[in-house]
Image: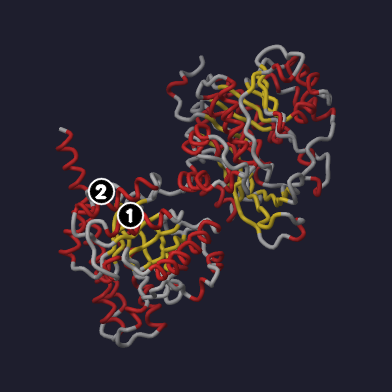
């Protein structure tokens, strides 16, 4: 008996290829001339799983990856995107597939598949778990995994189990001739080579699907003829599935019954007049949008509108999965429409794309800030070596308090604290890294950043760019102009390198403050088109000042990560009062405090009066107490809200 779909906790499972895409960073040249490559999730089913997850569906993937760095990258990245990786098998013998891709011009997109005995082609029937498949409302397959007996058997088993448990089934034909052995390694861009063998293989499975999607060329291989209408009729002869034919610039058409006399007679959705920048991955983006509409029960014109829009995003951006929209972004785009044909140059749209596709839960921020440089260099006994060793002790204190739990982080510099930064990687910590030259006003950067901020290209993805700018509404116009130009240049470089950006402002160090001061500074940066992912703000004396600062942020960026509050070397008692005031506002996610935690230990350690383990214990104790104070402040606000609601 078919399962009750209302009790399924997955919307869809995709099955098949998974790879790491290495995209040439330069546009307009040959692959031979690429200087650098960007690393993304790849493989048609993997792209679709990610694309549908971004649109709010509960998606999962069945595939294999290698037991190495690239395999772990795929699993971790999928999990960050919200994809269920229960069905991803780690293969101890084979490597994760790689694809090298490039954008030669607006019509040539060379790619090379590195798939010799790769992990995903070892997928077998034993990898298909019935209980897992039974959780899904739909199973989506792609054509490549029908090209080999072992992977075909796995796909057929998954389809049989899907039908047994009442799930719908879909096929993206996804025809790549060289993955069927019909073209050489250098012909990855080739989209169609006729083959009776491939046609026969596809036709033997088409009856298993409720939805079949492909380009005109893909229906040509499925139908065994280069006449598109005749090919669709040949597919219809063996399958009652809804057929969706992608027609490039002409849009797409859905056929639910008999094939009409013209492709124009199919059901269609509106298209979008955009610039073609990169067609690679566009079909997977299209499929993600189509699946969203299909599984939500939308009519075909509406589902095709979703699909066309998602395909338009992909065509206009670099990479495959990074290009796909969030649900909020899709809804915004459908409501507003196209205002800039090159979507990647649409600043309003790109801000929504960036801010709604960030990964990681940082709703609680307990941050130990030891990015201080000048303050430590001024202490008796200090040297670069001793400061570096002390910063490693600070990290030890963070790790002791964190104990593997989420919601903890650190601020550490790359000049004196480089070894601590290296050790902090991959531990589940939020990591902020300063760029400003200590105490500079007007703002200047650390030498490693470079005049063009090109040094950010060397930073790992998990590092957040932190910039402290001493500024005040009453600053002279020429000072404002210089500081604004520096922050704007830094912000652009952070986005270019896909790094989150934290802007710290401390108006009280530059002039008198009132309830409007910080809010005025915040609005000034937004008016420049600078959208920090994070704000770091000083404790404010009044609730009114917090209200105005939070309002200035919320009205400009509803998707901001939030605010962390700095300490300014305040006592624990003073910070407790500041925490109580700040915790009233949801935008304030926590604290980033330094000298209150490390000040006493730093003086003693650098002077040679405190052993390393004693310094760690002292700082861990203070850090732990501050974490408890913040948690109590936040819990107190939650309790107060609960009392109010009652």
**Who's the residue at 51% across and 27% down the image?**
136
Spatial separation of the CA atoms under disc 2 and disc 1: 10 Å
Return the x and y of residue 579 as percentages of the image width and height: 21, 56
Return the x and y of residue 119 as percentages of the image width and height: 65, 46
Regarding residue 596, the answer to whether it shows in the image is yes
- Counting labels gives 2
Q: Are marks 2 and 1 in contact (CB under 8 Å)?
A: yes
Q: Position of 21 compared to 593: left or right?
A: right
Q: In the rendering, which numbered label is found on residue 408? A: none
Q: Position of 312 compared to 534: left or right?
A: right
In the rendered image, the residue lying farthest to the bottom is 381
Nearer to the camera, 634 or 67: 634
**Who's the residue at 52% across and 64% down the image?**
459
Q: Secondary structure at mark 2?
A: loop
In the rendered image, the residue lying farthest to the top is 258
Quadrant containing the C terminus is top left
Nearer to the camera, 98 or 163: 98
Mark 1 = which residue?
563
Upstream in sequence: badge 2 or badge 1: 1
Q: Secondary structure at mark 1?
A: strand
Nearer to the camera, 369 or 167: 369
Q: Position of 16 compared to 565: left or right?
A: right
In the figure, residue 283 lies in which quadrant? top right
Above or below, 185 relative to 212: below
**Who's the residue at 62% across and 20% down the image?**
210
Mark 2 = which residue?
585
**Who's the residue at 38% across and 67% down the image?**
469
């Amino acid at each position: 008996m078919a399962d009750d779909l209302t009790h399924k906790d997955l919307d869809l499972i995709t099955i098949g290829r998974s790879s790491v895409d290495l995209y040439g960073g330069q546009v307009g040249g040959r692959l031979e001339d690429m200087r650098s490559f960007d690393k993304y999730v790849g493989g048609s089913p993997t792209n679709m799983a990610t694309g549908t997850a971004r649109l709010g569906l509960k998606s999962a993937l069945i595939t294999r990856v290698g037991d190495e760095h690239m395999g772990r990258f795929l699993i971790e990245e999928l999990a960050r995107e919200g994809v269920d990786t229960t069905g991803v098998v780690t293969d101890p013998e084979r490597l994760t597939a790689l694809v090298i891709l490039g954008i030669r011009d607006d019509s040539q997109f060379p790619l090379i598949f590195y798939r010799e005995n790769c992990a995903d082609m070892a997928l077998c029937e034993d990898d298909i778990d019935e209980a897992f498949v039974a959780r899904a409302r739909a199973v989506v397959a792609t054509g490549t995994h029908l090209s080999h007996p072992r992977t075909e058997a796995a796909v057929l088993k998954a389809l049989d189990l899907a039908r047994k448990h009442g799930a719908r089934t879909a096929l993206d034909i996804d025809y790549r001739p060289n993955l069927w052995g019909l073209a050489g390694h250098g012909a990855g861009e080739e989209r169609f080579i006729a083959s009776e063998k491939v046609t026969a293989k596809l036709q033997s499975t088409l009856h298993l699907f409720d939805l079949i999607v492909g380009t005109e060329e893909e229906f040509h291989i499925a139908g065994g003829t280069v006449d598109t209408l005749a090919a669709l009729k040949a597919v219809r002869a063996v399958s009652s599935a809804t057929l969706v034919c992608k027609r490039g610039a002409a849009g797409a058409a859905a056929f639910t019954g008999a094939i009409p006399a013209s492709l124009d007679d199919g059901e269609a959705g509106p298209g979008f007049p955009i610039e073609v920048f990169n067609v690679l991955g566009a079909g997977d983006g299209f499929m993600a949008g189509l699946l969203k509409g299909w599984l939500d029960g939308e009519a075909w014109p509406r589902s095709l509108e979703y699909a066309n829009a998602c395909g338009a995003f992909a065509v206009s951006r670099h990479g495959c999965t990074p290009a796909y929209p969030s649900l909020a972004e899709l809804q915004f785009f459908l409501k507003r429409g196209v205002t800039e044909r090159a979507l990647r140059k649409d600043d309003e749209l790109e801000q929504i794309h960036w801010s709604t596709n960030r990964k990681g839960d940082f709703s609680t921020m307990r941050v130990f800030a030891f990015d201080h440089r000048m303050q430590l260099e001024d202490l008796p006994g200090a040297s670069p070596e001793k400061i570096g060793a002390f910063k490693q002790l600070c990290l030890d204190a963070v790790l002791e308090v964190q104990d593997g739990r989420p919601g903890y982080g650190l601020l550490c510099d790359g000049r004196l604290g480089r070894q601590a930064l290296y050790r902090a990687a991959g531990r589940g910590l939020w990591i902020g890294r300063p760029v400003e030259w200590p105490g500079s006003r007007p703002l200047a950067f650390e030498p490693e950043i470079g005049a063009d901020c090109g040094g950010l290209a060397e930073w790992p993805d998990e590092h957040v760019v932190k910039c402290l700018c001493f500024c005040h509404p009453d600053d002279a116009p020429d000072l404002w102009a210089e500081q604004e130009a520096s922050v704007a240049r830094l912000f652009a470089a952070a986005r270019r390198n896909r790094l989150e950006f934290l802007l710290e402002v401390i108006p009280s160090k530059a002039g008198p403050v009132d309830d409007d001061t910080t809010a005025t500074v915040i609005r000034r940066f937004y008016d420049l088109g600078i959208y920090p992912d994070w704000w770091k703000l000083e404790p404010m004396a009044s609730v009114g000042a917090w209200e105005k600062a939070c309002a200035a942020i919320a009205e400009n960026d509803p998707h901001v990560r939030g605010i962390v509050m700095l300490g300014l070397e305040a006592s624990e008692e003073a910070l407790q009062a500041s925490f109580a005031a700040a915790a009233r506002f949801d935008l304030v996610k926590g604290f980033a405090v330094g000298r209150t935690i490390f000040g006493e230990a730093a003086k003693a350690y650098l002077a040679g009066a405190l052993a390393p383990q004693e310094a760690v214990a002292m700082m861990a104790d203070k850090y732990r107490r501050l974490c408890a104070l913040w948690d109590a402040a936040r819990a107190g606000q939650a309790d107060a809200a609960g009392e109010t609601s009652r």
